Amino acid sequence: MAGDRITKALLFISSLTILLLSAGIILSLAGGAVPAFKEYGIGFITSTKWNPTAGSEEYGAMSFIAGTVITSILALIICIPMAFSTSLFIAEYYRGTRTAGILRSLVDLLAGIPSIVYGFWGFYALRPLLVSTGLTDQGFGIFTASLVLAIMIVPYATSLSAEIISMVPSELKEAAYSLGATRREVIFHVVIPSARSGIIASFILALGRALGETMAVTMLIGNANIMPRGLFAPGNTMASVIANQFGEADGLKMSALIAIGLLLFLITALVNALGKMIIKRFA
Amino acid sequence: MKKELSDNIGRRNRANGWFRSLVIAGSVITIIPIFLIVGNLAVKGYRQINLAFFTEPAPDTFQAMMAASSGEIIPGGIANGLTGSLLMVLMASLIAVPLGLMTGIYIYENSTRRYAAFIRSLTEILQGVPSIILGIIAYLWIVKNITRGYSALAGSVSLTIMMLPLIIRSTEETMRMIPVTIREAAFALGTPYYKMIYKILIPVSFSGLATGILLALSRILGETAPLMLTALGSPAISLDITRPVSAVPLLIWDFYNDPNMVNLVWSASLFLMAFVLSMNLLARSVASKHKYI
């Protein structure tokens, strides 16, 4: 029938756009990155220099790779206890209750707040708080950025962890209870071991989120194009250097920024693929 | 012997109690930020929100400085951002919604084929791409080659690429919840394939699809980073898609970089957050009210 053929063709053609889009994104990023890699070779990745002065231009990605990895991992470390206890609250202790539902909605709301609002709030509300602790003069830096990042990724880690914890068969838990185990023992000896890979995957996927986060980090990290020297020192991430410098860039600098974009794309794709792989094996 | 045992159970019970308190404390700490953020923005932001806030474009820094120094509220508002946001989000949805729905249906209908599984994996990768990279892409494709300058079109292209995987995934997941029996019943009555899709698959999953679209909209409405590289921002209200436009998040960024405008940032942030969160809540209430049959 004509209608059938047209519908099937339409559906197939729209699926092709995804193929074209993905190929286009990779080719455009790779093409744009060529001049930078031609100029500096593979050393572009390992160099920590960033000097846009005309005549003595030199670009390297390592300070930003380090900034991205350090802020994201620190954010993950801060996020783990929060997301872990929240998911146990929702999927184990108060499973199916109204309280758990409210907590879940509140955590979901955290995911709805735009990145720039987090950045602005971090700047005006959180930063002064950190300055008053005396640990940092200005309040900008790796730690401030990581703290806000941690709040931003909690909902992603929580919702997946909670789902996986709630999938642990109740027969297993009941068997442990019938042997006289306390709830804590059931959690540590039954729930966590059988949900381990899924929980790990949820944190890996949350890490993938943190790696690409731009605005909040840009507003809080201090934007210093150097290797970060400490937890409270300023730095820059791959996403935030692009956000800061892309507008006024051309020529080699633009290519260097696109190359950083390509590297960021590869790192996030790799981390996400790892998380998805673990999840698939778990399910 | 008996004493040992009772000691032991005492210790285990105490550990049990401690761990439970730890879990509750951790959960409370996790949700404190949401109250802090909402409270902070509401207290500091409500004063600037009036009719002019929605009908007038952003003030220049001199006007803002004069107002701030005499203790008045800053004149002007976010009208240029509102129109720009609406323009770009509307254009992005016009392309991403139909395309995403069709691709999602394609993946669902052909889920046993390797090609469909491959497309699904590509969609998952696209969903994980940081939004700033989509800004670079729209810059390379549109700003450099088509509009030869920053433009609303480039902004909406970056938002379209962002929205597409969200719609595809939610469509496919919604479709998967429809009982197979409904499809089979339709086919048994001799319904042609395309009618089954338009008259059964889509209407039955409508609330799920609407939820997915609303959630995707609430995601791209707050997006800033890709727009910085594409739409750039504009001080005046503009509806020309080949020229730079502003957007609410872009205005927040501009205000943030101008110390005279601090009060306006609180209000603009409050408005953006309230708008995005209510869209989020609307999506969730649609989802919970209309459970799939």
Image (cartoon, rainbow, N blue to C red):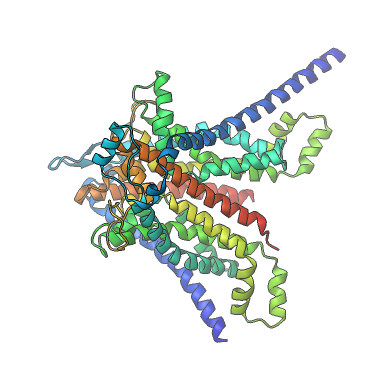
Give coordinates of residue B9: x percent, y percent: 80, 20
Give coordinates of residue A44: x percent, y percent: 27, 43
Give coordinates of residue B97: x percent, y percent: 49, 65
State the residue in front, A48 or B197: B197
Left-right relation of B156 to B216: left
Q: Is residue A202 visible?
A: no
Looking at the rendered image, the quarter that the N terminus of chain A falls into is: bottom right
Left-right relation of B65 to A264: left
State the residue in front, B113 or B198: B198
Left-right relation of B151 to A2: left
Furthest-left residue in this view: A55
**Up-down relation of residue A173 to residue A1 (above or below):** above
Furthest-right residue in this view: B2
**Up-down relation of residue A205 to residue A147 (above or below):** below
Report the residue at 29% width, 52% height from top. Answer: B232
Quadrant of residue A231 within the rendered picture: top left
Report the residue at 24% width, 59% height from top. Answer: B149
Left-right relation of A55 to A12: left
Q: Is residue A42 visible?
A: yes
| Numbered marks: total | 0
Give coordinates of residue A90: x percent, y percent: 66, 39
Report the residue at 41% width, 41% height from top. Answer: B267
